[in-house]
Image (cartoon, rainbow, N blue to C red):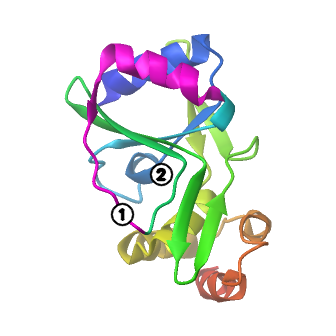
Amino acid sequence: METTLKKIAYAFQRARIHWGIGGSYLLKKHGIASSANDVDIVIAPESMDKALEILDFWGERRETKTDPNYETARYIAYDIEGTHVDVMSDIKVRFNEELYHYEFDSESVWYQDRKDGVKYPYMRLEDWYVLYYFMKREQRLEALDMYIESAQRFDLSRIDMLTSKSQYKNELMLRLNQSV
């Protein structure tokens, strides 16, 4: 998995693709999850075509099941050297009667690890807290809640900004305030 991610990171860096690493791989990086089954990559819409060209060169696109709760503009699953890589852009998640739209922006990447001259752009945990909330991924949320309680660092203003248009903002903030 690490070798595949390094290859992707190097190619995306050279192609100047705006992207971030999220999902269970991000949680593993922070010690929140003990393992990652795949690599979730979020790509800015303007970089998506170039990113797919690179990934198509190395990997096989996998079939995915359609889920009515997701209206993400572009979601492609790959198998690259035995690693499952999920690539998404312009994420939209149906939550009850609301369609939540996550916008990947310049603040979505919190930090970049550098190894052997390669940058690994890790997304913010706050962004994935919001995504997991709207995806109804309770197990992931509970793990993040425990992390927040112990780490005592979580940018509530980022959550506020990400949920500013949602009717569920207060509900999510109430849950978070119980952890902080």
Name the spot of residue 97 as percent of width and height, x first: 57, 83
Give percent across and percent down for residue 129: 56, 66
Q: Quadrant of the N terminus?
A: top left
Q: Nearer the N terminus, badge 1 or badge 2?
A: 2
Q: In which quarter of the image is the C terminus?
A: bottom right
Q: Is residue 11 above or below residue 69?
A: above
Q: Name the residue that disc number 2 marks.
A: 30
Could you say which is closer to the camera, residue 179 or residue 150? 179
Q: Is residue 82 left or right of residue 169?
A: left
**Image check: 136 left or right of 78?**
right
Residue 122 placement (x, y as % from top left): 56, 40
Label 1, label 2: how far apart the Cα atoms are: 29 Å
Q: Quickly name the residue at label 1.
A: 67
**Res 114 visible:** no
Q: Is mark 1 on a helix, strand or loop?
A: loop
State the image quarter where residue 130 is shown.
bottom right
Q: Residues within 10 Å of mark 2 (few under 14, many from 20)?
A: few
Q: Give the range drawn in magenta.
A: 47-68
Q: Is residue 35 above or below residue 129?
A: above
Against 41, residue 118 (above or below) is above
Q: Is residue 82 left or right of residue 113?
A: left
Foreground: disc 1 or disc 2? 1
Q: Which residue is drawn at 67% across and 65% down?
A: 154
Q: Nearer the viewer, residue 158 or 51?
A: 51
Tell me if residue 57 is in the magenta stretch: yes
- Say if the magenta span includes residue 105: no
Please tell me which residue is depicted at 44% across the width and 69% down the height of the picture: 69
The amino acid type found where label 2 is placed reads His
Mark 1: give few (<14), some (14-19) or many (20+) Cα within 10 Å: few
Disc 2, SS? loop
Residue pictured at 53% horizontal, 77% vertical? 95
